[in-house]
């Protein structure tokens, strides 16, 4: 075997390796629409539609959709709600989906949520009994769960904290008399220096 044949062989081997490796490496980069957590992407979008009606976008403040509250709500429901609370939450989402909340007009959405708000005392409070311990406990009405999660997700987002509040990571001295104008933002202090704001 002479030098020319060896170089051709090495070139073919290296070329084949690079081409094969390229397709092998890129095959690992395909993204699938996997469901992360308990809620599907459609349910997360539905939650953001509801939250946007509760916390709408204005000229001076971002809305719930801007703060991407749906992913945060999914995380809380998936990781921290009991199975009974999850059941109540999913049943409520199914009702919103059934009425096709996404396609309602702004006025219809507003009217429906106002009705929910007025009837919150009449909404059922679910009582469950733990089979092992025979303890019973109650969950809040589903609308209250959604509303509380919306507000929590909204206020814990970095976007809202830095754009809608005077964000101070560590509060300085307290000044009781400060001139205020219509453009003065409320203060947002980081409660625990060890925690970070949720990035959007």
Image (cartoon, rainbow, N blue to C red):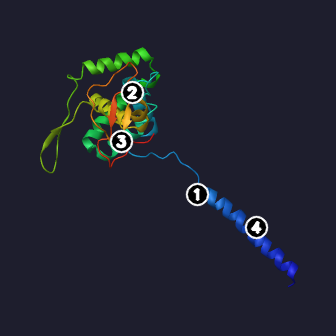
Q: Earlier in the sequence, mark 2 or mark 4?
A: 4
**Residue drawn where x is 29% and y is 41% of the image:** 191
Q: Comparing marks 3 and 1, which lies closer to the viewer?
A: 3
Residue 60, relative to residue 16: is it above or below?
Answer: above
Identify the image quadrant of residue 81.
top left
**Residue drawn where x is 48% and y is 47% of the image:** 34
Mark 3–mark 1 CB contact (< 8 Å) = no
**Residue drawn where x is 82% and y is 79% of the image:** 6
Residue at the disc numbered 1:
28
The mark found on residue 50 in the picture is: 2
CA distance separating discs 2 and 4: 55 Å
The answer to whether 144 appears left or right of 169 in the picture is left
Mark 3–mark 4 CB contact (< 8 Å) = no
Q: Which of marks 1 and 2 is nearer the N terminus?
A: 1
Q: Earlier in the sequence, mark 3 or mark 2?
A: 2
Disc 1 crowd rating (10 Å Cα; few below 14, some 14-19, many 20+) is few
Mark 2–mark 4 CB contact (< 8 Å) = no
CA distance separating discs 3 and 4: 55 Å
CA distance separating discs 4 and 1: 20 Å
Mark 4: secondary structure = helix
Mark 4–mark 1 CB contact (< 8 Å) = no
Q: Which of marks 3 and 1 is nearer the N terminus?
A: 1
Q: Earlier in the sequence, mark 3 or mark 4?
A: 4
Q: Can residue 100 be seen in this view?
A: no
Residue 38, given in percent of the width and then of the height, sits at 37, 44
Residue at the disc numbered 4:
15
Residue at the disc numbered 3:
169
Residue 63, given in percent of the width and then of the height, sits at 43, 27
Residue 26, relative to residue 161: is it above or below?
Answer: below
């Amino acid at each position: 075997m002479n030098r020319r044949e060896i170089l051709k062989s090495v070139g073919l081997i290296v070329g084949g390796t690079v081409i094969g490796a390229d397709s092998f490496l890129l095959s690992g980069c395909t993204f699938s629409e996997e469901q992360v957590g308990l809620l599907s992407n459609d349910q997360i979008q539905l939650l953001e539609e509801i939250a946007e009606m509760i916390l709408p976008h204005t000229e001076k403040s971002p809305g719930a959709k801007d703060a991407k509250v749906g992913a945060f709500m999914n995380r809380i429901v998936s990781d921290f709600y009991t199975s009974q609370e999850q059941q109540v939450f999913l049943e409520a989402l199914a009702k919103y989906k059934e009425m096709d909340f996404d396609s309602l007009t702004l006025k219809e959405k507003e009217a429906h949520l106002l009705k929910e708000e007025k009837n919150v005392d009449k909404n059922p409070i679910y009582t469950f009994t733990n089979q092992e311990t025979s303890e019973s406990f109650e969950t809040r009405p589903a609308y209250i769960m959604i509303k509380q999660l919306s507000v929590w997700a909204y206020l814990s987002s970095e976007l809202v904290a830095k754009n809608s509040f005077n964000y101070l990571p560590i509060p300085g001295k307290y000044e009781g008399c400060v001139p205020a104008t219509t453009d003065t933002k409320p203060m947002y202090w980081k409660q625990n220096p060890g925690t970070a704001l949720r990035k959007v």
